[in-house]
Amino acid sequence: MNTMLLSSYVFIVTLFAMAIGALLVWFALLREDQMFWTNAGGYPVWLRDLVLITYLPLLAAMTLLLLILSVILCAKICGPIRFCMIEALLLLTCWSLITISGWIAFSNNLTNLIEGRDLHHKTPRSTR
């Protein structure tokens, strides 16, 4: 396969991964918001179902995809193909988005355990 063609495919897949990573951060923020899970929040039921069903599988699939893209990037660095800085920066951004998404979910659960609440407890927001 032509190396330039492979490089363009990797670039497009990395851009796609960045968009999905941003979606995962939004899903993580919604998951940790108590108003999202109630009718008082004004969110549609289909969005709640979408977040509930797709967040964890999408997070796992994106992690696997980023591992594969990282291996491809390392092969490009070590091999005869020139190093592409834009792909490396996009990949770093993707890893950052996935890490932020995981940290949002993990930090809420850790706080709940430390404070003696249920693992997936959502603290209500104050209404002023």
Image (cartoon, rainbow, N blue to C red):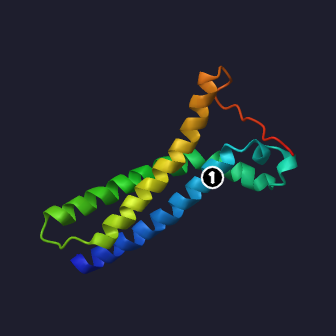
Image location of residue 51, percent across then percent down: 66, 50
Quarter of the image holding residue 118?
A: top right
Secondary structure, mark 1, is helix
Q: Is residue 100 above or below residue 120?
A: below
**Which quadrant of the rendered structure holds the N terminus?**
bottom left
Q: Position of residue 128 (x, y in %)?
A: 87, 46
Would residue 27 appear left or right of 22 to someone viewing this image? right
Instruction: List the single residue furthest toward the left.
Output: 80
Q: Residue at x 36, y 72 (%)?
A: 11
The amino acid marked with disc number 1 is: Phe
Q: Label 1: which residue? A: 27
Tell me residue 109's x, y (percent).
Answer: 60, 32
Classify mark 1: residues with Cα within 10 Å, few (<14), some (14-19) or many (20+): many
Q: Quadrant of residue 52?
A: top right
Residue 78: image location, x then y, percent: 14, 62
Position of residue 105 relative to residue 27, above or below, is above
At a point 76% along the width and 48% down the height, the residue shown is 36
Q: Is 74 on the left or on the right of 98, as rendered?
A: left
Q: Is residue 74 above or below residue 13?
A: above
> Residue visible at 35% across and 66% down?
89
